[in-house]
Image: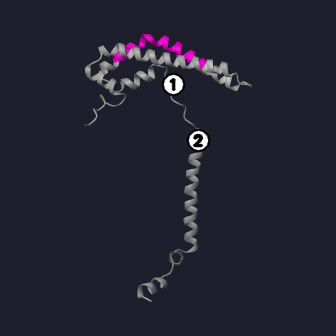
Amino acid sequence: MSGAAAHRRLQPSFLARLRQRMSLRRLALASLALNLFLGAILAAMLAGNTRKPSPPPSRPMPDRFVEHMAADLSDADAARLRAAFEPLRPRYDALTRDYREDGQQVRTLLQAEPVDFDSLNAAIAAARAKRRQIGELTEQTVLSVLPDLSPDGRLRLVGGWGTGGPPEAPKK
């Protein structure tokens, strides 16, 4: 048997060494401190769950879209974009209201027993058509304002949201 193996066998285990260093009183105090710490974390988590913050106020369409796009534009281009959407607010409000009503109709039909699948398909198609109208109105408005934007602003819009410019050309 080698000397290293014999030396390893004679060393006390980790727990034995820990018992030698710490008395029962110290272990009890350490356990108490750990339990108090974990209890404080649990109490903080429970207190945080009872006071859920209210969600941010929902901004109507087209405000969410415009502000998302305007974030990457210069102040002048962002103002032009906002000005192009402002006269369309009543039309967006009407389309959004109709879209929500169609969605509620879909939910109502899904809860009915038995489900009328023909009516359900018609309600889904109506909701899809409203969503498509909102998208087409948005596209038309963006296309109508593009000539008024600076070249950099146009490139930022074409490049996508948050890209800071057009997409990079593929490498050959």
Please tell me which residue is depicted at 48% across the width and 17% down the height of the picture.
Answer: 134
Q: How is the image coloured?
A: one colour
| 165 in the magenta segment | no
Please tell me which residue is depicted at 36% across the width and 26% down the height of the picture.
Answer: 71
Say whether residue 73 is left or right of residue 46: left
Judging depth in this view, the residue of 157 and 80 nearest the camera is 157
Q: Which mark is residue 128?
A: none
Residue under numbered circle 2: 49
At label 2, which amino acid type do we have? Asn
At label 1, which amino acid type do we have? Ser
For disc 1, the neighbor class at 10 Å (few under 14, some 14 to 19, many from 20) is: few
Say whether residue 158 is left or right of residue 56: left
Give percent across and percent down for residue 172. Answer: 25, 37
Give percent across and percent down for residue 68. Answer: 40, 26
Q: Main secondary structure of the magenta part?
A: helix
Residue under numbered circle 1: 58
